[in-house]
Image (cartoon, rainbow, N blue to C red):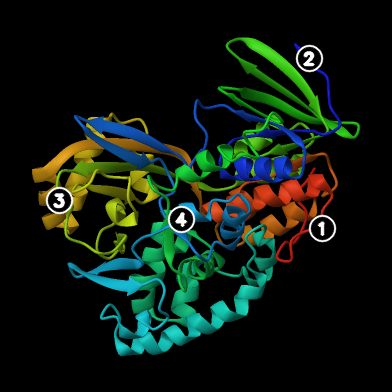
Amino acid sequence: MVEEPRADHVIVVGAGIAGTAAAFRLRRAGRRVTLLEREDHVGGRMSAREVRVGDALYRVDRGASWLSHNYTSMIELLGDAGLTGRMLPCSDELGVLRDGRVHRLSLVRSSGLLRTGLLGWRAKLRAVNLLRDLAAARRRLRWEDMSGAAELDRENAREYALRRLDRELLDYLVEPLCGSQFLTPAEEVAAVGALCIMWGTFGAASFTFDGGTGRLPEYLLDTPVMCSPGTRVELRAQVTEVRREGDGAVVVWERDGEVRTERARACVVAVPARAAARIVTGLDQDQRSHLAGVRWTSDVHVTFGVSRPPVETALGVAVPCREHPDLCIVLYEHNLGPGRAPAGRGLVTLIFRHHWSATRTTADDDTVIADARAALGEVMPDLAAHIESHREMAVVQRWEDAVIARPAGGYRDLAAFTASLDGNSPVQLAGDYFSYSTTNAALATGEQAARRILGLPPTAAAAGDAGL
């Protein structure tokens, strides 16, 4: 079956937050949009699943769990979509475990590092270097494209911390932040990545939606703009090829054994890097190799629903490697906003470093749950006992490609890749692999791809090209 093209028709491949943001911007500009998603739900790593226990309904985020007012692209999109009223406040504290004690840092107040008992006074003095380096780096950190940070990409986060900070700051700030964001030790990610975490995390309040972060793609598709006749959403649509043809694009996809070929004025490919390398035929060998070689960390994590919430005010507690080699953060998701756990109940997620997850990708759920409980008991025995006493359910989530952990030198590789792309092509790429793995970065790359298709100038913060 072959669909004839329309001059105003754009196909978006992938209904994660990058794809849904691109689709919204294109529809708002008057384009007809077809959104193709291989799963039976939208949102990708920004989606949720519902688990019912008797009359109690838990809503569990599959991937992303936390949002910040630092996410300027997302804040602007919410305003344009009429969704600002959906934003709800949540906990602004992040805990860090040291010697069995949780030290809580404010994500809003910059004085938090100076007041915390997590660090000694020498480490606090050395933290001034981190603040200076972050201030200098900010002009090169852009949500749409982090290739501008290539000039800063000279060492890994551990090397940077030992050179510019000290061992205490490495062990109890830099390393736990790297673990929480990238699911990997500090020596396995570029120092630029550590600066990105500080830039995106601290200095602004957190927010959420009723029911979790996975509501946002759903909300976008439910806006009047997206519910108009010019929008078509196809779920369980497996795209096998995207190619440029003349001044347009051709997309081949299949469902239930039926193969369809559609032509459109343009196409946004908003899928993970390795998937883009497989389906986009216009890539040269270097471009394909770059996408196929983007380093992802795997994630196998466990979420427990409990009949009584544990006593904790922080949104999560980061666990440094010095405290435990495998467990990297405990999320108290009931502190991340309403609608995740039923009233009076709690929702706790255990997230592990990638080496732990990599050895359990094929393990059965019961084994993963038992291993996760054992790890928690080794480092936070009171919480482990609380979960054991009040557990109502446990859910295991698996992501083979969960988070990009770009090593030292990876931002220089990114700069070479983005420089090789054609910003005027009818086929545009979008995804967090142009930046780092946050919902806001993915969203911003989707919007930037839409701007290129619409022939609009880049945003003030955008740099480089991202087309074929």
Distance from disc 3 to disc 1, alpha carbons, whole Å, reads 53 Å
* Mark with earlier residue (2, 3): 2
Distance from disc 1 to disc 4, alpha carbons, whole Å, reads 29 Å
Distance from disc 2 to disc 4, alpha carbons, whole Å, reads 42 Å
Q: For marks 4 and 3, give the one nearer the viewer.
A: 4
Under circle 4, the secondary element is: loop
| Amino acid, disc 4 | Met
The residue under the point 42% across, 50% down is 209
* Residue ID for mark 3: 384
Residue 378 in view here = yes
Q: Position of residue 113 (x, y in %)?
A: 36, 81
* Residue ID for mark 4: 87
Q: Where is residue 235 in the image (x, y as percent from the top left)?
A: 57, 24
**On residue 457, which mark appears?**
1
Q: For marks 3 and 1, give the one nearer the viewer.
A: 1
Taking depth in this image into account, of 91 and 79 the one nearest to the observer is: 79
| Amino acid, disc 3 | Ala
The residue under the point 76% across, 50% down is 451
* Mark with earlier residue (1, 2): 2
* Residue ID for mark 2: 2
Distance from disc 2 to disc 3, alpha carbons, whole Å, reads 56 Å
Under circle 2, the secondary element is: strand
